[in-house]
Image (tube, rainbow, N blue to C red):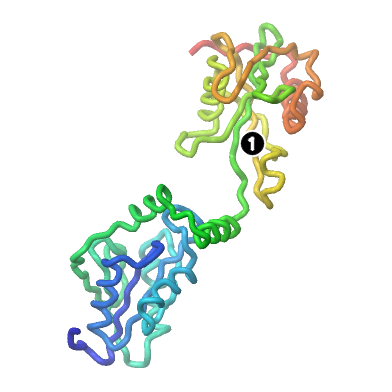
Amino acid sequence: MKEKQDKTDCGVIIGRFQVCALHDAHKDLIKSVIDRHERTIIFLGLSPIKNTLNNPLEFKHRKAMIEEEFKDVEIHYIDDNRSNDVWSKNLDKQISKWLNPKQTATLYGSRDSFLKCYSGKYPTCELEAEVFVSGTEIRKKIINNYPPTKDFRAGMIAATGMHYDTAYQTVDVAVINSQKNELLLVKKPNEDKWRFVGGFSDPNSMSLEADAKREVMEETGIEVGEPMYIGSTIIDDWRYRRSGNDKIKTAFFVAEYIFGVPQGADDVEVAKWFKLNTLTKDDLMEEHGVLLDMFVNKYLTKNATPKPAQMP
């Protein structure tokens, strides 16, 4: 063990430690700081968003993991902030809060650590890691090769219960042919009634309008004009009725048919045109009745003679 550098100086480590067990690089970092100082404090970064791939573990879980290996270190948390300057000032404040009178501190990190973001008053020291281990890669491997154990199943249940109530974003589209006064609906396998074209928003798309056009193409194979937003609502989707407070919230659009022959594709069995003056809520799946009301009240009543979309 290396000789202590300063009996009054405190070694401070800032990290995330978002892994299921400390790896060798973590252990080497912590041991190195312990060897240098009489006192070691670890601040764990705390994200405002829970249960994401980058931040799957709560503070208490990571604290317990570190304490299993290093019982004498002190562990606190530091909130994330979009501003590095604000984060640095807050970190300095937290360090000062926990230091003893006249005690100084040195902050430690590895090459890819917080050091490049810190602009506070305390001196920093970059430690050269002998072993590089990626926490991101560890998390990915766990997702693809998780152990089918009782503890793992319990952890999955706990993680699911800890996530924030979620409104899942979807889009639905009333595809119309103004020249024929028709509305396109689709039917899914094992359903006896019709529904509007639609599906979940793609996190990588640029807009909900882009999602709407994509869903129409994927489910029916036709092209439509630029979707026009007419409103939003919660959909009483049967899949989420027993999922606590999670809900489906859809953005509803109207889009004019341009060309193509509609055919069922993706998760749609068949697509069919309906005359607007004959369509009723009895023709639709129960959860899409609210969309028909919205279409009639917010679009048809204001567009008694809708104009067809112009070719681009």
Q: In the image, residue 17 lies at what x, y percent?
A: 37, 65
Q: In the image, residue 184 lies at what x, y percent?
A: 66, 16
Q: Residue at x 28, y 91 (%)?
A: 8
Of residues 25 and 94, the one nearer the viewer is 25
* Quadrant of the rendered image containing residue 240: top right
> In terms of secondary structure, where does tag 1 sit?
strand
Q: Is residue 293 left or right of residue 256?
A: right
Decide: is 175 above or below 25: above
Of residues 187 and 274, the one nearer the viewer is 187
Say which quadrant the N terminus sits in.
Answer: bottom left
Q: Is residue 276 left or right of residue 18?
A: right
* Quadrant of the rendered image containing residue 263: top right
* Quadrant of the rendered image containing residue 253: top right
Of residues 292 and 51, the one nearer the viewer is 51
Q: Which residue is mark 1?
A: 250
Of residues 206 and 39, the one nearer the viewer is 39
Mark 1 Cα within 10 Å, few/some/many (few <14, many 20+)?
A: many
Decide: is 53 above or below 32: above
Mark 1 belongs to which amino acid? Thr
Q: Residue at x 52, y 22 (%)?
A: 218
Q: In the image, residue 260 lies at what x, y percent?
A: 54, 9
Q: In the image, residue 125 lies at what x, y percent?
A: 22, 73
State the residue lying farthest toward the top. 180
Q: Is residue 235 left or right of residue 170?
A: right
State the residue lying farthest toward the front. 149
Q: Residue at x 38, y 66 (%)?
A: 21
Decide: is 204 above or below 192: below
